[in-house]
Image (cartoon, rainbow, N blue to C red):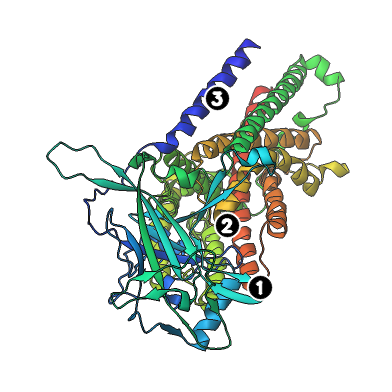
Amino acid sequence: LSFSQERLRCVLVWLLLLHGSDSFYVPGVAPINFHRNDPVEIKAVKLTSSRTQLPYEYYSLPFCQPSKITYKAENLGEVLRGDRIVNTPFQVSMNVEKKCEVLCHVPNKPVTLTVEQSKLIAERIREDYYVHLIADNLPVATRLEFYSNREEEEKKKEKDVQFEHGYRLGFMDGNKFYLHNHLSFILYYHREDVEENQEPTYRVVRFEVIPQSIKLEDLKADEKSMCSLPEATGSAPQEIDPSKENQLLFTYSVHWEESDIKWASRWDTYLTMSDVQIHWFSIINSVVVVFFLSGILSMIIIRTLRKDIANYNKEDDIEDTMEESGWKLVHGDVFRPPQYPMILSSLLGSGIQLFCMILIVIFVAMLGMLSPSSRGALMTTACFLFMFMGVFGGFFAGRLYRTLKGHRWKKGAFCTATLYPGVVFGICFVLNCFIWGKHSSGAVPFPTMVALLCMWFGISLPLVYLGYYFGFRKQPYDNPVRTNQIPRQIPEQRWYMNKFVGILMAGILPFGAMFIELFFIFSAIWENQFYYLFGFLFLVFIILVVSCSQISIVMVYFQLCAEDYRWWWRTFLVSGGSAFYVLIYAIFYFVNKLDIVEFIPSLLYFGYTALMVLSFWLLTGTIGFYAAYMFVRKIYAAVKID
């Protein structure tokens, strides 16, 4: 008992260390120091909606534009996410207040929206779009305050504060549309320690906005582009009537506040938006359940195997009188190559490629090098790593193909390099055509697509060939028993030995260990949340590897005991059983959590979900297959066979 307590304590200490690493300084993102009156540039990222899943660039709507529009050069991850970072006409200076200023056009001549523009804005408001701005690489957030309990005594207590990413474009009241045309920026700065005679320097540590809708008549503007805001009670909101032209003013105000938050911890506000308590509970729960089940499974398998091996290795005279039964019977067929060895080795090669990529990405992200502040870094890293991991994928696929008596290594290498990436590229291309049709910034531009194809055929394909060549030349895996010339007849199998039943049984444990984490990942992808709990994710990944391996070993043991030696494909399929549950969960999430009604957003959701399920099946199937293969070689090496 004391040993298991000690182990649990170690795990908890490690988890605490991981959790504490959230507020560390992020490598590669250097702080910017501002003096008073220095310009703080406000840029726009995109417009997003969890209802349509289609991001649009900022100037797709008729907002005020600066005299020269300049787009920031973006990395691959940003382009794939649909970010189009662009300058805006907001004039903000460090520690300089602005009461109310008109954004564009002469104050006595308001902005006139045409009927088409009014219709577009009304449609975006109906679709629940949010606008995302950044100041000093910090995203804008809207403060939401609410009371946790509605009782009177509780109301006197402090309010709960949560932050929402971006700000709402507008709101609806009945059938009327109202646009947020006045933005009150609240920027927080941290005063840095400097020597006495030096000018004080400041760093931006938080960026909030209070969006307001104020009617044109209530915004009293003068010749100097200054305006005065009405009393909060007496003002009417700015309505956008989609059936006619609308006149309005875009205005903003700037307020600065000093903050104790250090620059290194400035992202904490954004990253503590969800309840971490549930996370802790679920992770510890998963760890305990999985280790408990692992212990039981290991004990059962080891005890049963010891008994089996002891029986099989008894003296020959006893063996002659006893009729053989169980897994030793199929020793002459257990390593018989399966059907379609080239496709099996290709899929396993892609699985190895995915496994290496995911392991490195999660580990690096856990160390804090791929934090949300370095935009698009996670996706860029994942793309490049997948390309470079082709060497390992090719090596393992080539060696397995040779073991399965394959001869056409060039065809096998081509199959490994193109089968899984080809499916992914095909689905993404079809989905991209639909996004193009909607003129969304989420569509991958043609040059980026060509660049990805060049990476695939210029980096990944040669590396897979290189790995495959060396893997195929290497000594094949050493199988401990010879294969008979004539295949043995397989007895009729019980109903529970059916493939589909196996998939359902094998998928429960790995899925149960990770489904809470899946909720947070889905929220990050589909609801524009930040995902940052990579310490948790790393632990969940290890639990997933352990549980997949054990379930796979148990399933292959039962199969061989039933004298069915066709385990190669079956192990790969059954080990990926948790992917089936991921698909069911994705459908549940779509129905219960998302408010998607249109065809194209639904198509995007299920298209990307299909890719996730396919990748997850390859990953878990590969883990299970290699665990089962090692297990089968071990047990047949332990028995004496004449």
In the rendered image, the vertical position of residue 92 relative to residue 638, given as above or below: below
- Crowding near pointer 3: few (<14 within 10 Å), some, many (20+)? some
Quarter holding the C terminus is top right
Residue type at the position of mark 2: Glu
Rendered image: mark on residue 12: 3
Residue type at the position of mark 1: Phe
In this view of the protein, can residue 566 be seen by the observer? yes
* Residue 324 place in picture, x, y as percent: 82, 26
Q: Residue under circle 1? A: 599
In the rendered image, the vertical position of residue 2 relative to residue 169, given as above or below: above
Pair 2/1: label in front: 2
Residue in the picture at 51% in, 76% down: 436
Residue 7 relative to residue 339: left or right: left
Helix, strand, or loop for circle 2? Answer: loop
Is residue 564 or residue 212 the one in the foreground?
212
Residue in the picture at 61% in, 65% down: 51
- Indicate which disc, 1 or 3, sits on the residue closer to the N terminus: 3
Residue 338 relative to residue 226: left or right: right
Residue in the picture at 59% in, 55% down: 612
Kindly report the distance in space between the C-alpha atoms of the residues bearing marks 3 and 2.
30 Å
* Residue 275 place in picture, x, y as percent: 59, 41
Residue at the left extreme?
197
- Indicate which disc, 2 or 1, sits on the residue closer to the N terminus: 2
Kindly report the distance in space between the C-alpha atoms of the residues bearing marks 1 and 3.
45 Å
Q: Residue under circle 2? A: 527
Is residue 51 or residue 213 the one in the foreground?
213
Residue type at the position of mark 3: Leu
